[in-house]
Image (spheres, grey):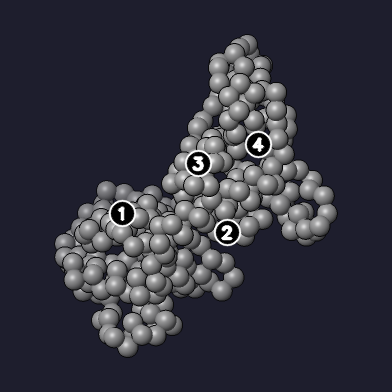
């Protein structure tokens, strides 16, 4: 591979367009006819947000308040990818913050141009016009449903505790011995929904406190491949935080060379009575 040298950099700096201003005013005009037609609206949003080639804006779910989260969905005819934003305010406060937020969440897969403030208003109006606002209560009920459906599919692991350091190592080793519910396990279940599960997600029930713990990666695998949700691990964490689920990381370092070093990313499930309220 050819190295990029200092001379190459100087040559690029001498180009006429090196110091040109950032392009602004480069999204299409938003007319009432576009707002009234969902397909035109998706085309307009695709032109404005600029996803990768072959991808198109498919859906947008938002809340009634700017502090609520929102979700943008893009599709390519075979897959749907959901980008979850923690606060709608991040997409509306300023063009610079909007671009930075989208770049962070979408990992560069969406590339909106530099916008004028009035164009940012058009973009938000178009996104909100794609689907009526989803009430905060609906989002919470959706997250609770995911949790309850996962709990129904878990297999309990009892006789261990994470509440103190001495017992924690044994609990982490027991989790490791149990094995993890993976994509291949989920694929087997989907091929034969009525058959036995090769392995179930684990629910560790703390013998000292009665707390219930779920493995984070298993939870995401269940939602993605059993419930068929396109959801990131971080998005799942945010959604469950809203109903009281806490994310925790545990590890127990090896006492001697060659000893196991168990660790686990877990979700602490609140009391079911608190979740159902």
The mark nearer the N terminus, 1 or 3, is 1
Measure the C-alpha gap from mark 4 to mark 2.
21 Å
The mark nearer the N terminus, 4 or 2, is 4
| Foreground tag (2 vs 3) | 3
The picture quadrant where one finds residue 91 is bottom left
Q: Residue at x 45, y 70 (%)?
A: 59
The mark nearer the N terminus, 1 or 4, is 1
**Within 10 angstroms of label 1, few (less than 14), some, or many (20 or more) residues?**
few
Q: Position of residue 16 (x, y in %)?
A: 17, 67
Measure the C-alpha gap from mark 1 to mark 2.
24 Å
**Within 10 angstroms of label 3, few (less than 14), some, or many (20 or more) residues?**
few
Q: Residue at x 38, y 80 (%)?
A: 41
Q: Position of residue 46 (x, y in %)?
A: 39, 74
Pointer 1: what residue? 67
Pointer 2: what residue? 229
Q: Nearer the viewer, residue 247 or 98?
A: 247
The mark nearer the N terminus, 2 or 3, is 2
Which mark, by number, is residue 203?
Answer: 4
Element assignment for label 4? strand
| Foreground tag (1 vs 3) | 3
Q: Position of residue 22 (x, y in %)?
A: 20, 65
Element assignment for label 2? loop
| Foreground tag (4 vs 2) | 4
Pointer 3: what residue? 274
């Amino acid at each position: 591979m050819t190295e990029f040298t200092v001379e190459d950099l100087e040559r690029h700096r001498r180009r006429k367009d090196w110091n040109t201003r950032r392009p602004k005013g480069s999204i299409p005009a938003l007319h009432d006819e576009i707002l009234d037609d969902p397909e035109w609206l998706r085309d307009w949003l695709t032109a404005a947000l600029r996803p990768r080639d072959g991808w198109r804006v498919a859906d947008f779910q938002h809340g009634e308040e700017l502090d609520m989260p929102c979700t943008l969905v893009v599709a390519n005819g075979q897959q749907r990818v959901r980008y979850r934003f923690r606060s709608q305010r991040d997409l509306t406060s300023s063009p610079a913050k909007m671009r930075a937020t989208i770049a962070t969440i979408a990992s560069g897969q969406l590339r909106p141009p530099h916008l004028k403030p009035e164009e940012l208003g058009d973009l938000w109006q178009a996104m909100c016009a794609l689907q009526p606002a989803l009430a905060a209560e609906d989002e919470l009920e959706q997250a609770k449903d995911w949790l309850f459906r996962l709990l129904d599919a878990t297999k309990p692991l009892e006789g261990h505790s994470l509440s103190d350091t001495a017992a924690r190592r044994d609990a982490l080793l027991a989790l490791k011995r149990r094995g993890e519910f993976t994509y291949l396990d989920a694929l087997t279940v989907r091929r034969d929904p009525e058959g036995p599960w090769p392995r179930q997600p684990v629910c560790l029930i703390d013998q000292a406190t009665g707390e219930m713990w779920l493995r984070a990666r298993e939870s995401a695998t269940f939602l993605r491949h059993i419930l068929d949700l396109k959801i990131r691990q971080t998005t799942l964490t945010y959604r469950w935080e809203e109903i009281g689920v806490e994310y925790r990381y545990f590890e127990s370092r090896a006492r001697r060379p060659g000893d196991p070093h168990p660790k686990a990313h877990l979700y602490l499930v609140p009391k079911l009575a608190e979740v159902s309220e």
